[in-house]
Image (spheres, grey):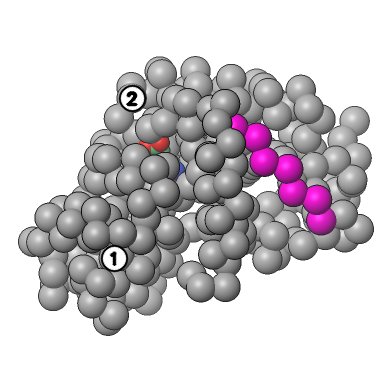
Amino acid sequence: MAKRTDPIGVFDSGVGGISVLRALLHKMPGENYLYYGDSANAPYGTRTPEEVTALASNVASKLADQGVKALVVACNTSTSVAMETLKKNHPELIVVGIEPSVGLAASQFPEGHIGVLATPATIAGRRFMYQAEPYPNAKISLIPAPNLVEIVEAGKYDTPEADAYLGNLLRPYIGKLDALVLGCTHYPFVEKALHRVLGEQVAFFDGSSITAEETYRQLLAAGLLNEDGGAVQIQNSLQDKKILTLCMELLGTQEEI
Ligand code: DGL
């Protein structure tokens, strides 16, 4: 039986879900958190749906075994292919996923040109496209970004290497976009590089705040909200201290982004 003081489990293929953890901490600073990054197996976004489902299920079980009261799937790729399996495997837990926030972007730019930047797996699944249906005049461009996760995992998110990669990938869109949806939880960390490439006028949208709101709503409904904690524990499948240091560095970028 879950208790109020049990931690919220948050996981991603690697360090990207820290952008969701930041939003969760902002919304619910009194919760305890257990974050798991599967960096040894990142990236997920160039794998088959079966592989992603198997990896995400394995990580979810690790967190469930450590007594979390909820699972936040802080990975768009895992959400898009593995959500049903995760809910089926853990009927005792609140399970919340993250989707590219296309609906929010389109509601603010209903006549605009909106880019959706995501992993190849998330783009191929097109699961989020239903959000654009109420906005038939919005022009949506789907932009898969293989290798961008690796740049963030290597800690090179605010470097000339990130600028060069994004400059090349986004060249056809420079000067054309009103908004860009950051459809992978690693991407909020390249926001500065994206602004350098696209200019300051493009609005960015990511799903972290919506996910934090939804987690809050579900915990409240279950009577499981905690205001007396605040502990954050970070685990990673990569047995390398550097990855934990990177997670703490990314968690500390809260004020800037
Ligand atoms: N942060 C994950 C996501 O939101 C990245 C997946 C990957 O490892 O490719 O999709």
Q: Nearer the viewer, residue 196 or 108?
A: 196
Q: Where on the picture, by quarter, is residue 23?
A: bottom right
Q: Nearer the viewer, residue 110 or 178?
A: 178
Question: Looking at this rendering, what residue extends furthest in the bottom direction?
Answer: 201
Q: Nearer the viewer, residue 10 or 111?
A: 10
Say which element carries label 2: loop
Dominant SS of magenta comes to strand
Q: Please count the marks in the image.
A: 2
In magenta, the rendered stretch is: 230-236
Q: Which mark is residue 194?
A: 1
- Which image quarter is the N terminus in? top right
User: Which of the four quarters of the rendered structure image does ligand 1 lie in?
Assistant: top left
Confirm whether residue 129 shows in the render. no
Q: Which residue is mark 2?
A: 47
Residue 233 is covered by the magenta coloring: yes
Is residue 213 positioned above or below 76 on the image? below
Q: Which residue sits at x=29%, y=80%?
A: 200
Q: Is mark 2 within 8 Å of ligand 1?
A: yes
Q: Where on the picture, by quarter, is residue 150?
A: top left
Distance from label 2 to label 1 (Cα)? 25 Å
